[in-house]
Image (cartoon, rainbow, N blue to C red):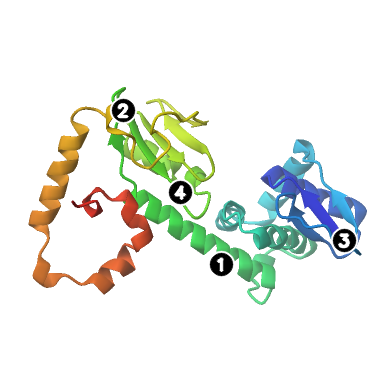
Amino acid sequence: MNYIFDGSLPGLLTAVFEWFERKPGKIALKSTEMFQPEAFAECLLIESNSDKADRVWKGLQKKLKKDWLRIFYCSYLSEIPDAYNHLFQFTIYIFQNELGAQNNYGNEHVIALAKYAKSVEREKHRMEAFIRFQHTADGIFYTGVDPDFNVLPLISNHFKNRYADQQWIIYDLKRKYGLHYNLTSVEEITIDFTNGVNCKNPSAILLDEKEELYSVLWKDYFKSANIVARKNTKLHIQHVPKRYWKYLTEKQLS
C-alpha cells in the first residue's frame, strides 16, 4: 500500500501519525510529484494536518537528540524521492524502539538518513564558501544560486551574522524562492523576474555603477596573486569543484 503526501514536512509527519492510527502494515510513502499509479497497489492520499504533524515532531524531540533532529531535517531538505520513504520508515522505527535506536547503523533507514544529511551538509558549507554577491543599484546585495539540495534554510544564519550591516537577497533559481535580509530579520520571498534578473548575474543596468569596477579589480588581484608555477589543477578541483566556479568572480576571467 502507498501513502501519497504533498511533499511537505508537515505532510510527511502527518503520514506517520496516520500509520500509527491505522496500523495498516507495510507502507511506502511517496510524494504526489513522483507518484506513479500501480495496478495492484492501494493508495491513501494524506492531507497535511498541523496538529498531527506537531504531535509527531514533539515525539521525535523526546526520542532524538539535536544532532539527529538535524540529520532528519537535512535528509528532508535533500529532496531525494527515496529519502521521503526512508524518513517515514525511520520515524516509525524510532517510535517502536528504545532510546538510542538511531545509533543502530545496521538499520537501512539509519544509514540512508546519515548519507543524505552528509551530502546536504557538504552542499551547505560549499554555498557558504562560494556564494558571491553583486551590489544592485537599489543598494541590495544579490546572488542567484541553484544548489543541488534545498539548503537555503540552513545557510540563513551564517549570512545574517556575516553580513549583518547589509541588505541582501539569496535567491534559489531552481526552487523559485529566496531569502531577504532587511537589517533586522530574514524572510522568505519570491520574485517576479523581469529584464535580465532571472540569471546568476543580473544585467549591468540593474547593478551599482561601481560593481563592474570592483569585479575588474578583484580579477586583476587574483591574476597577480596567482603563482602559475605552483598551479595544481587536480587538487584545486578537489577543494573547489567545477560546478561551483559559476559563483566565483575570479573564474569569469576574460
Q: Residue 244: image x %, image y %?
A: 36, 56
In whole angstroms, how far apart are the C-alphas of marks 2 and 3?
Answer: 53 Å
Q: Which badge, 2 or 1, comes first in the chain's sequence?
A: 1
Three-letter code, disc 2? Leu
Can residue 102 be seen at all in this image of the molecule?
Answer: yes
Q: Disc 1 designates what residue?
A: 115
Per the image, the residue denoted by label 2 is 206
Spatial CA distance of label 1 from label 3 is: 26 Å
Q: Quick check: marks 2 and 3 in contact, CB under 8 Å?
A: no
Element type at mark 2: helix
Identity of the residue drawn at 85% across and 61% down: 38
Compared across the picture, whether 20 is left or right of 72 comes to: right
106 over 18 or under it: above or below? below
Is label 4 in contact with label 2 (beta carbons under 8 Å)?
A: no
| Disc 4 from disc 2: Cα separation | 21 Å
The answer for how far apart the CA atoms under marks 2 and 1 are is 41 Å
Q: Amino acid at mark 4?
A: Asp
Q: Position of residue 92 (x, y in %)?
A: 77, 60
> Which of the two residues, 96 or 217, is positioned nearer the viewer here?
217
Q: In the rendering, which numbered label is found on residue 141?
A: none
Mark 1 vs 4, N-terminal side: 1
Nearer to us in this view, 88 or 56: 88
Q: Are marks 2 and 1 in contact (CB under 8 Å)?
A: no
Q: Is residue 56 visible?
A: no
Examine the rendered structure and indicate whether residue 197 appears above or below residue 4.
above
Mark sitting earlier along the chain (1/3) = 3
Q: What residue sits right under mark 4 in the picture? A: 146
| Label 4: which secondary element | loop
Please report whichever mark, 3 or 4, sits nearer to the chain's N-terminal start: 3
- Where does the image place residue 154, in percent across and percent down from the top left? 48, 47
- Judging depth in this view, the residue of 136 and 100 nearest the camera is 136
Residue at left 75%, top 64%?
93
